Image (cartoon, rainbow, N blue to C red):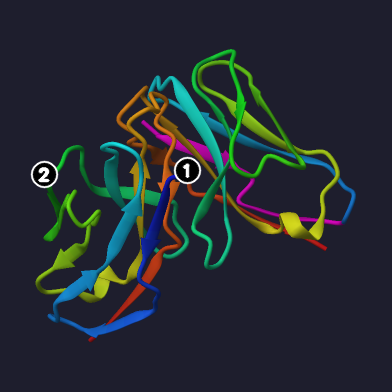
Amino acid sequence: GNSVTQMEGPVTLSEEAFLTINCTYTATGYPSLFWYVQYPGEGLQLLLKATKADDKGSNKGFEATYRKETTSFHLEKGSVQVSDSAVYFCALSPPTDSWGKLQFGAGTQVVVTP
Amino acid sequence: NAGVTQTPKFQVLKTGQSMTLQCAQDMNHNSMYWYRQDPGMGLRLIYYSASEGTTDKGEVPNGYNVSRLNKREFSLRLESAAPSQTSVYFCASSERGWGEQFFGPGTRLTVL
């Protein structure tokens, strides 16, 4: 079946540090891949997405590249801010699913300190 | 444009009680979803509705029922609540395909 594996948190960083959150997936074919972010007390928001191999999604200084050869979609940001403290979820949408059902990873909590 | 709204925000139930969680979206989306979020487990799909008039089971449907009342509204019912259903519940909606979903703010449910 389809699955998503993320690095465990919490990840604690100082402001302006480099952030990487690893995400690998198992799926048949070419799924669409997503990163969602959940700020404290809120629902999930789409951060970025990629729909085919070698695509790079980017938003708010975050980037992730769809790597088919390593089945990965790692999230990176060059200089984090305190406001980036949140839980980050990697997710996939199977290519055979036209209704948009998502398979989520367990989430990675990121804490950025001043 | 409110997006996806959920009521209530918080609820405490006793074992065996019933309740309905309400969800509405104003984006004219076809598909709607109910998830539960538990620590260390990410979000798990309970039920979804691909389009008005249809509903299907997700990964963890036991103990729940749903109703797609119209295109805007999708409710989740717990007929006889159990402590294992203590969780945060999220409703989401999307256009068909592509998988991009928009989430509500969640309902925090505690079952004693």
Q: On the rendered image, what quadrant is the C terminus of chain A found in?
A: bottom left
Task: Please tell me whether mark 2 sits on a helix, a strand or a loop.
Answer: loop
Residue B10, position in %: x, y?
65, 55
Q: What's the CA distance linking mark 2 and mark 1?
A: 28 Å
Q: Is residue B21 left or right of residue A112?
A: right
Name the quadrant containing residue B18: top right
| x and y, in percent, of residue B44 in the image | 55, 49
Is disc 1 surrounded by few (<14), some (14 to 19) or many (20+) residues within 10 Å? many
Instruction: Report the chain holding disc 2.
Output: A
Whether discs 2 and 1 lie on one chain: the answer is no
Q: How many marks?
A: 2
The residue located at (36%, 24%) in the rendering is B95
State the residue in front, A1 or A81: A1
Q: Is residue A79 above or below residue A92?
A: below
Q: Which residue is mark 2?
A: A55
Q: Is residue A70 above or below residue A95?
A: below
Q: Badges 2 and 1: C-beta atoms under 8 Å apart?
A: no
Q: Which residue appears at 86% of the width and 56% of the height?
A: B14
Q: Would you say A113 lies left or right of B26 here?
A: left
Q: As shown in the figure, which amino acid type bears the numbered disc 1?
A: Gly
Q: Position of residue B100 (x, y in %)?
A: 32, 36
Q: B17 or A26, which is in the foreground? A: A26
Q: Residues within 10 Å of mark 2 (few under 14, many from 20)?
A: some
Range of residues picked out in magenta: B1-14
- Farthest residue in the right direction? B16
Amino acid at pointer 2: Asp
Q: Which mark is residue B104?
A: 1
Is B5 included in the stretch rendered in magenta?
Answer: yes
The residue at 14%/81% (across/down) is A17
Q: Is residue A40 left or right of residue B22?
A: left
